[in-house]
Amino acid sequence: MLFGPPGTGKTYRAKRLAERVIRSAALTKMGPSRYFQSQAEIETAIKNNVHRLQLHPAYSYQDFVRGLHIADGGATEYRAGYLPRLIEDIEKQPRENRLPHVLILDEMNRTDLSRMLGECFSLLEDRNQTIELPARNKAGDSLKLRIPDDLFVIGTMNLIDQSIEQIDFALRRRFLWLLCPFDAEALVGAAEAKWNDLKSGVAWDRVKDDFRKLAGGATALNREIHDSPLLGSQYEIGHTYLLDVVLFLRNTEGLTRKQNFLWNKKGDALGPVIQVWNLSLRPLLEQYLAGLDAASRNAELERLAKVLLKPTVTE
């Protein structure tokens, strides 16, 4: 379970983790020589064996496991949900001939997990064991369900959603929990990739130090948010919220002639950083502080703005 504040790249990390699961299994199964000769096969497995399901408040047991539907003749019938159909597709290939599959359950805290999982609650732990689901179809047959041990489940959760507190402790122990906090290096790396993709005409080396200063300012901002009695660690700003600075800078007039890109010589933020504060970060923090009176809210916002817009550290 990857959890943390919004915007910290949990879905991206889940996809990379899924790839590592498949590659690790391929190396173990094939051995080094065949592994390096079978990269096309492994890439195909990574493309086809990673399944991402976006959860939301309306997603239910009927969607995930089994539900009643109206048949063509007007009668009702039970139909398998997403998970049984996925398992059926996986097991069309013999266990010894296939690489693992990974199911990413994105934003698991947005739905009622215990209700959605139903009988799968215990099957997450009791792999390769078969259970019968209650009720039968009109032919008198029951639906059996078994989760194979080569189907891995990765979940993502946002700390900011208070519904995370409603997760059963029994469900918690069926996952390993990995915190995904703000990452200054991830911000710089993502900014570099985005900057190079935009082909601005300005080499990354010229703007790199400015983005490192931005990462330092964001680190200081999150430290203040973490220590704030009005906010706390769950309200820290994820690095993806700051990436619009790249586009704002790219669209700056006379970019190729500039000497200062994100900060002036005094260390004050220039247009692109001010834009991302005004258009992205301040509105977000205003929502986080919505329960406060206007004077307290504005004072906290002004205090935090100074931390980001005139950073005193570089990292």
Image: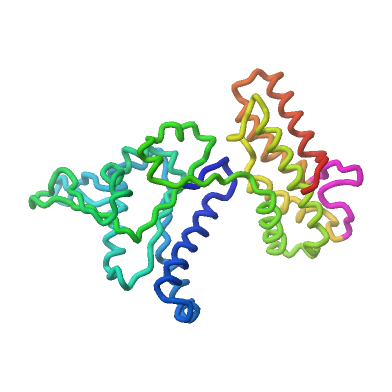
Name the one closer to the observer, 183 or 48: 183
Whether 168 is drawn above or below 289: the answer is: below
Identify the residue at image location x=63%, y=48%.
Answer: 240
Whole-percent x and y of residue 280? Answer: 67, 40
Quadrant housing residue 222: top right
Residue 166: percent from the left, percent from the top? Answer: 41, 32
Magenta span of residues:
257-271
* Point 32% across, 41% down: residue: 116
As for residue 167 lying within the magenta part, the answer is: no
Q: How many numbered marks does the figure carry?
A: 0
Residue 258 among magenta residues:
yes
Residue located at (88% from left, 46% from top): 264
Looking at the image, residue 148 sits to the left or right of residue 283; the answer is left
Asked whether, in this view, residue 283 is left or right of residue 309, the answer is left
Closer to the camera in the image, 246 or 83: 83
Looking at the picture, tell me which residue is in the foreground, 239 or 94.
94
**Image quarter for residue 163?**
top left
Residue 292 quadrant: top right
Residue 287 locus on image (x, y percent): 61, 30
Residue 265 position (above or below residue 278)? below
Image spot of residue 49 (x, y percent): 40, 64
Q: Residue at x 41, y 76 (%)?
A: 30
